[in-house]
Image (tube, rainbow, N blue to C red):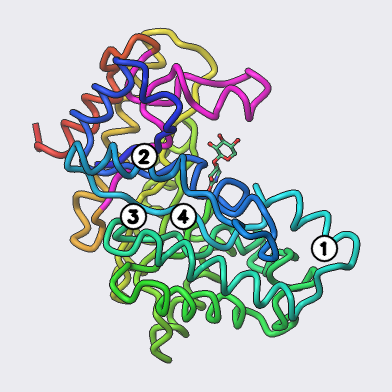
Amino acid sequence: MGAAAQPQLLSEAGYATTLGSEYSQLEPENVMKFSFVHPRPNTDPAPYDFTQADQLVAFAEQNSMRVRGHTLVWHKQLSGWLTSGIAAGTYRSSDLNFILQDHITTVMRHYAGRVYAWDVVNEAFNGDGTLAHTVWYDSPGIGLAGRGTAYIEQALSWAHAGDPNAKRFYNDFGAETLNAKSDAIYQMARDFKQRGVPLDGLGFQLHVNLSFDNPNTLDSFAQNVKRFSDLGMEIHFTEFDAALDGGDPQRFASQGDLYRKVTLVCVQNPNCKVFQTWGFTDKYSWIPQSTNNQQGWALPFDLNYNKKPAYFGMLNALTGQ
Ligand code: XIL
């Protein structure tokens, strides 16, 4: 059972106590992303900065929690030096190839033995199943533009060299049910499996709302998880939250039921090893900020770290009560 966490909040007693006592895994919500760990160009004497991520890893170790790494190859939350250098034409594909390889290997080596699994690649596909045009794929890319998932394969191979003992994941949103996006990811995973490309698992983000609590949706979700698991992939639910339009008891009860049903899908699949929420308290959730304050209340603890029905929904699924 995991939660995304932020190091600057660990000084708040309720935050640290709840995180350290209720969860067995944490994942940095932001501080292992490119802009945080790689704030300066490779030509700088100190291109990398692990200060904030190290704080979280130390907290996890003090509290006997595992750490899941997030994320190495993503087109968001990149450093200004990189995006402005690409825009200016300073960095071409051969430079980006070097920068990404160095990034993956340096970050993974820094955390070797301390981070047991990595979202190596995050959100590479569009909803229609095509590959997103990103700085790493083809804009300008690392030199494998137009060659489909070859750049993802390259990143996974570099990740294998960075820490051969860490599990390598592909992580995405909107690929929870059977649809064009999950079909494309499935084709990639099957191809990688057949050719021995080092992909160990799939991360399903699961940023949902109460509309996900629909028999057809939940059935499609369970079938989709099963097909990846049947390929021999490990499954992690990585960023679950269930956004609400209001914080009233009735909505909290419905949310609790959805938490129970989604947790059950993991519990009932032997290859599903991680159920993780994106944060754990409604006090610090990305949902209000990302929905212009139209939605919130998405997590299992309320603003005062009291357990909501969502918490008991997860517990119920885990204990079969
Ligand atoms: C989000 C964080 O929660 C926010 O604090 C940040 O401002 C933007 O990123 N998919 C992902 C996560 O893989 O990294 C994102 O996290 C949420 C969507």
Ligand 1 rendered quadrant: top right
User: Marks 2 and 4: CB-CB under 8 Å?
Assistant: no
Q: In the rendered structure, which disc, 2 or 4, sits on the residue that comes first in sequence?
A: 2
Name the residue located 30 percent from the left edge and 65 percent from the top edge: 234
Camera-side residue: 193 or 61?
61
- Mark 2, residue position: 56
As measured in the structure, the alpha-carbon distance from the residue carrying label 1 to the one carrying label 3 is 33 Å
Q: Hey, what amino acid is under mark 3?
A: His
Q: Residues within 10 Å of mark 1 (few under 14, many from 20)?
A: some
Which callout, 2 or 4, points to the residue nearer the camera? 2
- Mark 1, residue position: 86
Q: Quadrant of the N terminus?
A: top left
As measured in the structure, the alpha-carbon distance from the residue carrying label 2 to the one carrying label 3 is 20 Å
Q: Which numbered disc covers residue 236?
A: 3
User: Marks 1 and 4: CB-CB under 8 Å?
Assistant: no
Q: In the rendered structure, which disc, 1 or 4, sits on the residue that comes first in sequence?
A: 1
Residue range corresponding to the magenta coloring: 274-302
Depicted 236 relative to depicted 159: above or below: above
Report the number of numbered marks.
Answer: 4
User: Marks 1 and 3: CB-CB under 8 Å?
Assistant: no
As measured in the structure, the alpha-carbon distance from the residue carrying label 1 to the one carrying label 4 is 35 Å
Q: Hey, what amino acid is under mark 2?
A: Leu
Kind of element beneath mark 2: helix
Q: In the rendered structure, which disc, 1 or 3, sits on the residue that comes first in sequence?
A: 1
Q: Which numbered disc covers residue 208?
A: none
As measured in the structure, the alpha-carbon distance from the residue carrying label 1 to the one carrying label 2 is 31 Å
